Image: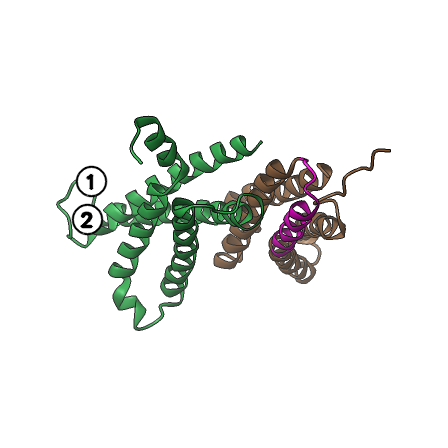
Chain colours: A brown, B green
Amino acid sequence: MKVAPPPLFATWLGYLTVILAFAALLGTIVALGVRRKDEKRAMFLERWAFRCVIATAISTALTTIVALSLFTLSWTSQNVYRQLLLAASLFTLALTLAGWRERDSDVLWKAATRLLYLIGYAGCLALALAIVGMG
Amino acid sequence: MLNGLLVVKGIVATITFVAALIAFLTMMQIRKKIPAILPGNAAALRRWHLISGRISLVSTIFLAFIGMGLALYLYPPSSLRPWLHVVAGVLTTLWFAGKVVTVRRKLQPWMKQLLPIGVILFVLHVVIFLTATIWAYWFKITGVP
């Protein structure tokens, strides 16, 4: 009887990364939506989205460490190299977004940078989903 | 699959090295340590230094992540070249982070030593580039040990 290989990135840590990336994207979108009605709440949400993207980077690093340890122990041939590439991209993108937001706290509120910033958050979520989706 | 990862790593590493070279040359020209070989005034050169430095920083983070994954778990170094590559990679990442923190927070007395700090950073980039897999393949092809 064949036993399915254990998932490397689709663990609770991987799902946590997805949730954090989703929370960051949701936070920015909702912040944009409520800005006109309630500026204080918008600022609060935007600040939490920034924290979520930092947490996404940390969570990605932790997930990768655990996944690669599992791979070394059980040696299941899966998409590990592709997943490592995607994890490195997610980590870099999340850190870049965090660094950008740290340098410029108005990045979400400026029309010139808003779209690129939002695309970055959406990219984080897409990468996190792709990593977990590969198992 | 490993080959695909190494190809991506090689392409990004080349971009990193070119960006580091541009950052090095622009700052050397601004500080008049080399003859004026690049076009543009000091402000334009400083802008290019910043842009190429940021590209180099982001791609170094990306490469460090992949490199640590490969070196620690998937493809541990087995001979002198990969060991040198890994050690130079770790040193470069730490040195780069230190330089960024120094510049951002204007840490004294390190702000006065930015030129040697930058030169050492570029030398580390050169070491990583020269100990990369591409040269190992090249030496095998050409018969040089």
Q: In this view, does B47 lie to the left or right of A9?
A: left
- Residue farthest along the top direction in this orientation: B141
Q: Is residue A94 left or right of residue A14?
A: left
Quarter holding the C terminus of chain A? top right
Dot 2: element: helix
Give x and y (percent) for residue B129: 35, 42
Give x and y (percent) for residue B11: 43, 34
Give x and y (percent) for residue A120: 58, 43
Residue at the disc numbered 1: B38
Residue A122: name its quadrant.
Answer: top right
Residue at the disc numbered 2: B29
Task: Chain letter for mark 1, please.
Answer: B
Dot 1: element: loop
Residue at point 39%, 38% (across, down): B15
Q: Where A73 falls versus B3 (above or below)?
A: below
- Residue farthest along the left direction in this orientation: B35
The kind of residue tagged 2 is Gln
Quarter holding the N terminus of chain A? top right
Q: Distance between the residues labelled 2 and 1?
A: 8 Å
| Pointer 2 local density, CA inside 10 Å: few below 14, some 14–19, many at least 20 | some
The answer to if B99 sits in the magenta stretch is no
Give x and y (percent) for residue A94: 57, 50
Q: Where A58 falls versus A82 (above or below)?
A: below
Residues A93 and A10: in front is A10
Q: Which mark is residue A72?
A: none
* Chief secondary structure of the magenta portion: helix
The kind of residue tagged 1 is Leu
- Residue farthest along the bottom direction in this orientation: B109
Q: In this view, does B82 lie to the left or right of B118?
A: right
Q: Where B108 falls versus A4 (above or below)?
A: below
Region of the chain picked out in magenta, as a range: A58-78
